[in-house]
């Protein structure tokens, strides 16, 4: 077992700690030359040249990036993208989207609270009463639910919007209020039900009504956390430039979809990926890798996801790789094999 020297340092895991459990500490080329390579992101073009044809690769390999997958196939790798695991109970412990989105939702609220110049909780002090912060959450998947729970722990008043009707109960169970936008046609209802638990693009008629309801809440909000994503497509625009203009000075938007919306923005077109910008006195935080800011837990949870996946593809003595295609998780995660892109 080889480790690239320093690979864990930014998550506070030292080479010594890995060596103590039996890892051989080597350079990047040494680690990339193994039969099974575990990574966080896809290898770069340069890294690919150092990998062995026939080797296996497990990581977050961006399943919707066809060009990236073609490069992995050309390098003759058997590769598995953990983001493609089905959202089923059995796959839960290997679900990298969930483990990392949970962190992103938490950290987004912590960053908002840090930037915001007022308290989150309502306080009655001798020097006067402080109102609770009003927080609006847009998109209530894993990140959104954790954002609600975190903002609630800090004492905020929360409203949240999603296209999927099933989230209403989840929002309410965490102490938030659902921004209800009833469906008016069968087409709207069907789109809202999504596929495999994921959202599909909603018809413009529903989006227009949602925008009216969301705009009212955003105008009164102190904090907006947006997390709305649609797999394989640009993230939807939910906070327009006009909505930002109507917000109070000092409000904070954390756009978790930063870099994934149209033209490199996020759920807000004014978001700048990787930066915090001020527009009309409103701070828009466009951090693109929130889990990396909680690196130790992000790494520990990711490691557990990878380890549980390896149990499906490694023989008991870890001597050989199996690819049981009758296992729905393995079949879904397999991206390339024998020089071909196998992802449908
Ligand atoms: P995601 O990151 O793909 O998207 C975030 C949220 O944005 C989703 O809730 C989506 O509905 C919402 N969204 C999309 N367009 C929107 C719009 N126009 N307005 C408002 N909201 C919008 O979602 P996710 O966190 O990966 O979760 C996706 C689904 O998978 C959820 O149903 C979640 O409960 C489910 N899930 C299941 C399991 C499991 O069963 N093992 C594990 C994790 C997640």
Image (cartoon, rainbow, N blue to C red):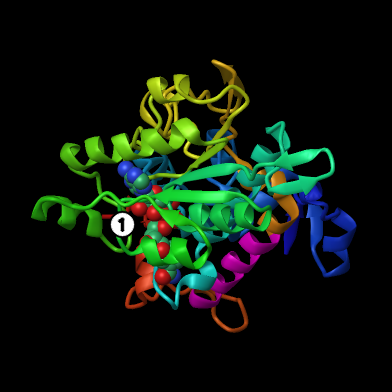
Residue 301 part of the magenta-drawn span: yes
Please identify the quarter of the rendering in which residue 315 is found: bottom right
Asked whether 321 or 114 is in front, the reply is 114
Residue beneath disc 1: 164
Please identify the quarter of the rendering in which residue 120 is found: top right
Residue 231 part of the magenta-drawn span: no
Picture coordinates of residue 318 (x, y %)? 61, 77
In the drawing, does residue 217 fall left or right of residue 249? left
Asked whether 343 or 272 is in front, the reply is 272
Residue 212 in view of the camera: yes
The quarter in which the C terminus is drawn is bottom left
Picture coordinates of residue 279 (x, y %)? 54, 17
- Look at the magenta stretch and give its main secondary structure: helix
In the drawing, does residue 272 fall left or right of residue 22? left
Q: Which residues are magenta?
A: 300-312
Q: Is mark 1 within 8 Å of ligand 1?
A: yes
């Amino acid at each position: 077992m080889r480790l690239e020297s320093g690979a864990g340092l930014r998550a506070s895991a030292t080479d010594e700690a890995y060596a103590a459990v039996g890892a051989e500490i080597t350079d990047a080329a040494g680690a990339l030359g193994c039969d099974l390579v575990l990574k966080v992101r896809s290898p770069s073009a340069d890294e690919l040249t150092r990998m062995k044809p026939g080797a296996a690769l497990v990581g977050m390999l961006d399943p919707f990036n066809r060009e990236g997958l073609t490069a992995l196939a050309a390098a003759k790798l058997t590769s598995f993208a953990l983001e493609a695991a089905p959202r089923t109970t059995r796959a839960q412990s290997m679900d990298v989207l969930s483990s990392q989105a949970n962190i992103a939702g938490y950290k987004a609220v912590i960053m908002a609270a840090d930037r915001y110049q007022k308290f989150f909780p309502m306080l009655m002090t001798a020097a006067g009463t402080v109102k609770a912060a009003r927080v609006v959450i847009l998109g209530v998947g894993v990140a959104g639910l954790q954002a609600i729970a975190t903002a609630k722990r800090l004492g905020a008043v929360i409203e949240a919007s999603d296209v999927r009707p099933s989230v209403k109960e989840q929002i309410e169970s965490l102490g938030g209020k659902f921004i209800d936008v009833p469906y008016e046609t069968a087409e709207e209802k069907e789109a809202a039900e999504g596929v495999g638990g994921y959202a599909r693009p909603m018809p413009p008629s529903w989006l227009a009504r949602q925008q009216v309801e969301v705009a009212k809440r955003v105008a009164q909000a102190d904090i907006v956390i947006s997390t709305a994503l649609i797999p394989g497509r640009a993230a939807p625009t939910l906070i327009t430039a006009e909505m930002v203009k109507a917000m109070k000075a000092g409000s904070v938007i954390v756009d978790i979809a930063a870099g994934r919306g149209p033209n490199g923005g996020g759920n807000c077109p004014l978001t700048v990926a990787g930066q915090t910008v001020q527009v009309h006195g409103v701070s828009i935080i466009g951090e693109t890798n929130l889990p990396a800011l909680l690196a130790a837990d992000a790494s520990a949870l990711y490691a557990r996801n990878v380890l549980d996946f390896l149990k499906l593809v490694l023989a008991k003595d870890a001597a050989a790789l199996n690819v049981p295609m009758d296992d729905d998780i393995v079949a879904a995660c397999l991206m390339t094999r024998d020089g071909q892109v196998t992802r449908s």
